[in-house]
Amino acid sequence: MRKFAVVFIFLFSAVFGGCIHDPAKSSAVFVEERVTVEEYAVEPPAKTATRIRTDQPIKGVVVEPPKFAITSAFFDIETPQEPTEELKAIFQVFDIPVTDTPRVQHYMKYFTTNGRGNMQSWINRSNKYMYIVRDIFEKEGIPLDLAMLSFTESGFNPIAYSRAGAAGMWQFMPSTGKIYGLSITEWVDERRDFEKSTLAAARHLKDLYKMFDDWYLALAAYNAGSGRIRKATQKHNSTDFFTIAGSRTLKLETRDYVPKYLAQLFLYKNLYSYGFTPPDETPLLFDTVELGSQANLIVLAQALGSTYEELKMLNPELRTPVTPPTSKYRVRIPFGKGAQLSKLLNDGKFDQLRYTLYQAKAGESLAAIAKRHGISVEDIQKINALSYPKIYSAKLLFLPKKGEKLTSADIQFAKEVQSLSPKYHTVRKGDNLTVISRKYNIPLYVLIRMNPKVNPKKIYPGQVLVISRGGLVG
């Protein structure tokens, strides 16, 4: 199935036919990121815009056959060759309703002018994941054209984060991710797992469609939440998205969400017609190997003749170079390396972690820990990116094995876990908790909670306060 999907994607990348677009409509603006809505967006007209919509069944909506040599207001381009009838058939069918509005045209123009560079880079990146997304959507029984919603959400970026706290290719908030089985721990954030998050997105979209019986309302609910869309339909006594979007009941971001998606869908199916080039990224191929215990990706990369960066890209859900402390964790590795890694793991002599994990308690000194394990304080500090000689808040430490000399791999490991080390503040004369909380932009109650043994009313110069817990506390 995967080989077929890959062949299809290459074919898809090579020949793009299209959907219909009237280029004579109005100009465009675009919101590149959700957080910059105000910067780019223009208020849509107050009353409902004239639009064309297919009201045929959701599955197999046939539009006018694609035109492969067109002249538009923006371009005068001909495709290199006339596609076969079979390929034309692929691209002249949408599996969601197709609507054209002035607002869709706004986005069409933006993505073909000022936003062209971003759109092309997203198209390039999408080819790494598109066959995976479409495979999962097909198995879940939802329209395959919804795969292009990831353009709207993240530009197909699995490690994207928003200021609001959404993450991953499908921009799940922690609460919604949890509902759909995406784990967020100190070790992993499965919202960034391009397979698990895609499955979650498919099921979420399916649930929203069941709730509203309309894909446009389902998409709006994906952006704003089902509660807000339900209230909007009740307020306007309408289940037509564009009727509701004609008012200011919903935020501008949500009112523009469906037009933005439709514009990107149209452009993706008309790349040649609008002057885009086929994706230069190749589909992401990999093997998966089940681990019986924790492994260090830097160690695995060296053993497989790969790089840590490649393994990190294949496993974007990992928040550290080390896999979670669970058995049967499936790690992705470069395609064709599965048998090699399985052999190493079954050898019994392969040290896949390299370190000993130690749960340090608040108040422990590194000297005592080092003496107990027969290693040096300096090595503990280097590997864990620590600058203090004492543990001020509970933390999981990576300890080198006794007699092991540090290598460049250990230095690379330290750089990766540096952000996980707790941050501290040494109290100076004139300091108080209010001043410190403002300095580091930490709510006062959080600062007090992170320092339970500190008397909030009596701190003194030289005292060390925790201002960040760090990532791993065991």
Image: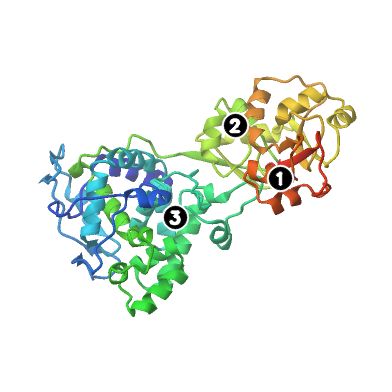
In the image, residue 127 lies at what x, y percent?
A: 37, 42
Which quadrant holds the C terminus?
A: top right
User: Circle 3 — which element?
Assistant: helix
Identify the residue shown where x is 26% and y is 41%.
114
Identify the residue shown where x is 37% and y is 58%.
253
Q: Mark 1 or 3 closer to N-term? A: 3
Q: Mark 2 or 3 closer to N-term? A: 3
Q: Mark 2 points at which residue?
A: 340
Q: Distance between the residues labelled 1 and 2?
A: 23 Å
User: Circle 1 — which element?
Assistant: loop
Q: In this view of the protein, can residue 223 be seen by the observer?
A: yes
412 to the left or right of 176? right
444 to the left or right of 30? right
* Relative depth, front residue between 469 and 382: 469
Q: In this view of the protein, can residue 350 be seen by the observer?
A: no
In the image, residue 271 lies at what x, y percent?
A: 23, 44
Q: Which is in the foreground here, disc 1 or disc 3? A: 1
Q: Residues within 10 Å of mark 3 (few under 14, many from 20)?
A: many
Amino acid at pointer 3: Ile
Q: Name the residue under label 1.
A: 325
Identify the residue shown where x is 28% and y is 38%.
278
Determine whether 298 is above or below 260 in the image: above
Q: Name the residue under label 3.
A: 136
Q: How far apart are marks 2 and 3 (CA)?
A: 28 Å
Determine whether 408 is above or below 228 in the image: above
Amino acid at pointer 1: Pro
Amino acid at pointer 2: Gln
